[in-house]
Image (cartoon, rainbow, N blue to C red):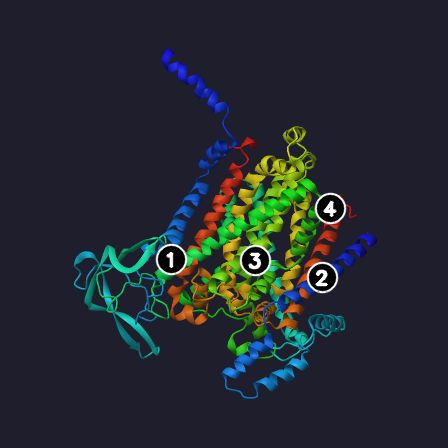
Amino acid sequence: MAVAAAPAVPAKRKELSQSYWSLVWYRFKKNKLGVFGGILLIVLYVSFALIPEFLAPYALENRSQFVEAPPTPIRFVDEQGRFQAPFVYGLERRVDMVKRLRTWVPDTDRKYPVRLFVQGDEYLLLGLIPMNIHLFGIDADPREARIFLLGADALGRDYLTRILYGGRLSLLIGLIGQFLTIVLGMTLGVISGYYGGPVDMFVQRFTEFLAAFPNIPLFMALSAAIPNYWSPIAVYFMLTIILAFLGWGGLARQVRGLVLSLREREYALAAKSFGASDRRIMFRHLLPGTTSHVIVIATLSIPGMILAETALSWLGLGLRPPLTSWGTLLQDAATIRAIRFTPWLLWVVPPILLTIFAYNMLGDGLRDAMDPYSGRG
Amino acid sequence: MVNYIIRRIGYALILLVLVSFVSFAIIELPPGDYLTQKIEQLRARGDRSAEQQVERLRQRYGLDKPFLERYVNWAVNFLRGDFGESFEYERPVSEILGARLGYTVILAIATTVFTWALAIPLGVYSAVKQYSLGDQIISVISFIGLGMPGFLLALIVLYFAVILFNMEVVGLFSPEYERAPWSIGKVLDLLSHLWVPALISAITGIGGLVRIMRGNLLDTLGQPFVEAARARGLKNRTVIWKHAVRIAINPLITILGSDVFPSIVVGSSLVAIVLNLPTIGPVFVDSLRKLDMYLAGTCIVFLTFMLLVGNLVADLLLAWVDPRIRLE
């Protein structure tokens, strides 16, 4: 008995001194929607940003003769009604005389089994490891038959591959842009709240001015200003910087407000009376007090950035081909002609929406969890 | 009060000049101008006299003059009601915008009325019947609407309309009414097209409004004056609509000012582009893309103007609705 009781006492004491973050984690775990959003985001980032080369059956720019081929269904039952291992039919070109359209129809004479871990186009996994294994594919000469789970685009490229690769730029622009916003917004917010004076004046007026500006037009005007002879990568980074540049104001204001109240707290005064330098007080003592707010604001504003990239690229003001992002893919998908004749190009929309909702769910869960002393739940 | 309004207007004017200057400068940023693009086009077509033609245009639009001179010229003419000429359309800006202003206003009003007529009752219902099944359904829908970007929703609606129902939902009129004079049939045709953009704006706009209305009303319902009204034996309906909602609606009035007024100029341009609506939004986006600076500049100035007017109107409305607010 005594043995059993002994560890119970320290365990209880440990519970009493739970840190802020472990309380946050405890509360966050109870929010099913938030956890679901978080897991969804991990899956999305791993599959779209980390290993799209492995998941995609072909290479990004691998063209074929199968121009605008519709999605290939994976079949289990052949034309005689026999059940067998998954396979796809080959494609045959047909001209629809009524609609005056060229279409692709399944050719039931040619069957290609669908396999996992097939060899195909070569790539560098994570940019390092040379590989040619793809998650799935068909056993066939790629000149003769292909598998297009989500159809093919106007150059006969596999659309699933393009969506997978395109996610990388779109998803990362949100993360990188938000990182820049946080660095700018937190630094200027802390300085502006702690010192006041000219920096405060600048931050205040600047954010007011940005707020007076109509938002989307400002994005568009600035990204229209990116010279079109720049290399695609330079355009990408410039776009990220523009998005961050327009976003930091709100964050700086929030941090400033928090710092204004934090700097009057006892612990800040104590640090000051111990002779800590201004920089130490600002970045060591005050800034951590704002992190929980900043994390929530950042999580909830990443979708806005991803959408801004998507919308701008779609309008032809953001990223341009040969860069492939969800926005540039939308350029081909969002026309009346495309919706009528190649509706599968709209498959780029679900991943965008999924990402946005995942971030919103995660952000909502975090917002509730970040305030563990509120006594709710 | 009068003092306050005058000061606000003075401040707004200064901001307007600043915004117009900065937007002019931003449009100036890209290397080259509209005419450099035009030269390339003409050359590509093999037009030998391209240079001379463009030189003539350059002088006509004053593009050979320095930046500041051009801005001052444009600004002075702007005050006289001459907004300059669009390069792309080769017509006065006022004519282009004027032709589209009517539809833009109709659309803005239609979507606003639709959205608000839905959002306020839903918000009130979901606060009064907190945690009921209805509240939960409304919460889920508003959560989805909150994150849903309008132009993607427009694409989805378009997809279902075209593929599943084989409907034409693009534009504001059917082809046969496009150029017809106004008649009962044309109005009905307009209404049959108007519901698509109105519905899209409603779904995307309703989420935020419902959440705010619900949260505020919940706070208000717990306050002593609501209790007092109940204690006086007033009907539940009266307590909610006459006492609680009147106070809880304040933040929505601020949103009304900052959202609805600007939307009269370029309400949801992206949705309008997808649905090919004849409003100002698409023209504006196009002008930014093509460096058509007088057209773009005019749009931005009007947009900012509407934003400032909207904010002022919202503040005045707020003071009128809620006598506790004193404007300083």
Picture quadrant of residue B130: top right
- Amino acid at pointer 2: Leu
Residue at numbered disc 2: B18
**Is circle 2 on the same chain as circle 4?**
yes
Q: Which numbered dot is residue A242? A: 3
Query: Tag 2, which chain?
Result: B
Is residue B289 visible in this depiction of the protein? yes
- Amino acid at pointer 3: Ile
Q: Front-most of B266 and B187?
A: B266
Q: Position of residue B35 (x, y in %)?
A: 59, 78
Q: Viewer-nearest of labels 2 and 4?
A: 2
Query: Tag 1, which chain?
Result: A
**Disc 3 + disc 4, Cβ < 8 Å:** no
Q: Which numbered dot is residue A164? A: 1
Q: Position of residue A165 (x, y in %)?
A: 39, 58
Query: SS class of the residue under badge 1?
Result: helix
Q: Viewer-nearest of labels 1 and 3?
A: 3
Q: Viewer-nearest of labels 4 and 1?
A: 1
Query: SS class of the residue under badge 3?
Result: helix
Query: Tag 4, which chain?
Result: B
Q: Is residue A319 above or below residue B245?
A: below
Query: SS class of the residue under badge 2?
Result: helix
Picture quadrant of residue B243: top right
Residue at numbered disc 4: B322
Give the alpha-carbon distance from disc 3 to disc 4, as whole Å.
40 Å
Q: Is residue A74 above or below residue A39?
A: below
**Disc 1 + disc 3, Cβ < 8 Å:** no
**Disc 2 + disc 3, Cβ < 8 Å:** no
Q: Front-most of B208 and A40?
A: A40
